Image: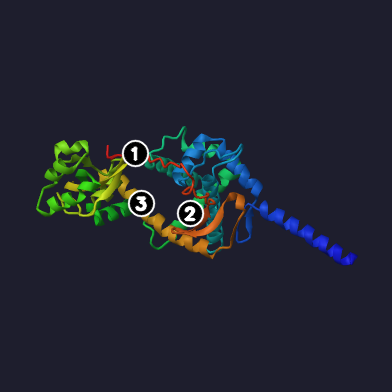
Amino acid sequence: MRRITALFVIALVLAVLVGRSAISSGVSVNGSTVSGTEVRAELSAIAASPTLQCYLTAIAPASFAAGGGSSTMAASGVAAWSNLRIEGMAIDQYVRGQLHYVPGSDLVKAQTSLELEMSQAAASNQLSCPGTAAQALAAMTPSMRATEVLAQAESLYLVSKLNSTIPLTLSALRAYYDAHRSNYDTICISVAEVPTADVTAFAAAQAKGATVSALAKKFSIDPSAARGGVYGCYGPTSTYYAAVRADAGTTPLNTFPKSPLSTTNNGVTYALYVAATKRIPTPFTGAEAAVLADVRTLNATSANTLKNDILSRAVIAVDPAFGRWALGTNGPSVFAPALPSTSDVPGSTTLTAPSALNYQ
C-alpha cells in the first residue's frame, strides 16, 4: 500500500512539474523552444516603447497597447508577436535544414532591409510613428534584435530561392513594367456616393444611358457632385494610387460599374461608384516605386504560400498565455482567445466610426 501511495505521489509530482513546464514553455516549433521567460522579456520591451509598438503594428496589424491589468498587453498584440516568433523559427529551421543557409555578412544588409520594410509598412498604413525604424530596433533587447535581423536575412534568402521570385534589380523591374504598362497609368476618376435607397433609381438611369456626370449630379451626396463627380487624377507616386487603381477596376472609361463598393459616412452606409474617366501612360521613372511595391507583393505572396506549407507540416506548441495555434482563412497562425459575446448584453451599444472617402 505504501509503495502504491509512493508511486502515486511521484506521479503527481511529475504531473505538476510537467504542467509547470508546459505553462512556462513559451512557444515551440518542432521541439525548438523559446522560453516563456524570454517571450515575456520581449513583450516587456515592446510595451515599454511606443516607437516599437507603432512599427510592429504596421508589420503585423494588431493592438500592442496595454491590456486590462498592470504589466499586461492586449491579447491581440501578444498573439501577433507569438505568431511572428513562430514563423521566424519555422523558416529558420527550413532554410538551415533544407537550403543549408549559413548567416554571414548578409546580416548587415538584412538589418537595413528590415528597417526599410518597417518604414514602408508604417507609411503604407499611414502611421506617424514617434521615432525611426532604427530606433524601434534599438528598443528591442539585444537577443530579440539579433533574432529579428536573422529572421529577415533568412526570409530574404528563402525568397531568393523561389522559382517564382522576381529579382529586385532595375532590369527585372523594368521588364515587369514593360509587361504590365497599363497597370501604372495615371488614373483620373469621378465618383458617386449614393444613398442605398436610391441605388435602384441610379441603376435604372444608368441603364437608360445617363452619363457619369449626370448620374453624379443627380444621385451623389459627395461634394464632388457639383462638378459631375470629378474627383481628381492619381499617378503611381500618389499615396492613394493602389486604392484608386483597385476601386476603378477594369470598367471601361466613363462608365460607373454595375456593382458598387460601399462606404460609411457619419455612421451611414452608402453605395460608392468609381469611374475612371481618363488613363494617362506613366513612364517607368514615374512608376518605379509602384512597380517595386507590386513585385515585392508578388514575391511575398509566393513566399507566404511556402511559409504556410512549412507551418502546416510543423509541430507547434504555444503557451495559452501567448495565444492559440489554429488554422485560419490565411493559413495556420496564432490567435488571441475569443472574447465572450456581447450580443445578449442588455443596453450594449455599437459605435461605428465614420469613414468618408479619402482620396485626397
Q: CA distance from mark 1 to mark 3?
A: 42 Å
Q: Tag 2: Cα neighbours inside 10 Å, few (<14), some, or many (≥20)? A: many
Image vertical order of residue 164 relative to residue 273, above or below: below
Point 51% across, 46% down: residue: 76
Q: Which residue was labeled with disc 1?
A: 354
Q: Nearer the viewer, residue 49 or 147?
A: 49
Image coords of residue 51 (percent x, y): 50, 35
Q: Which residue is mark 2?
A: 155
Q: Residue farthest to the left?
A: 209
In the shown orientation, is residue 40 left or right of residue 293? right
Is residue 282 something that shows in the picture? no
**What mark, if any, has residue 169 been given in the picture?**
3
As drawn, which residue projects farthest toward the front?
346
Q: Is residue 248 visible?
A: yes
Marked residue nearer the N-terminal end (3 or 2): 2
Q: Is residue 79 left or right of residue 269?
A: right
Instruction: Residue 12: give x, y in percent of width and height.
Output: 78, 59
**On screen, residue 314 above or below 251:** below
Amino acid of disc 2: Ser
The structure residue drawn at horizontal position 16% and vertical position 54%, both measured from the top left corner, is: 252
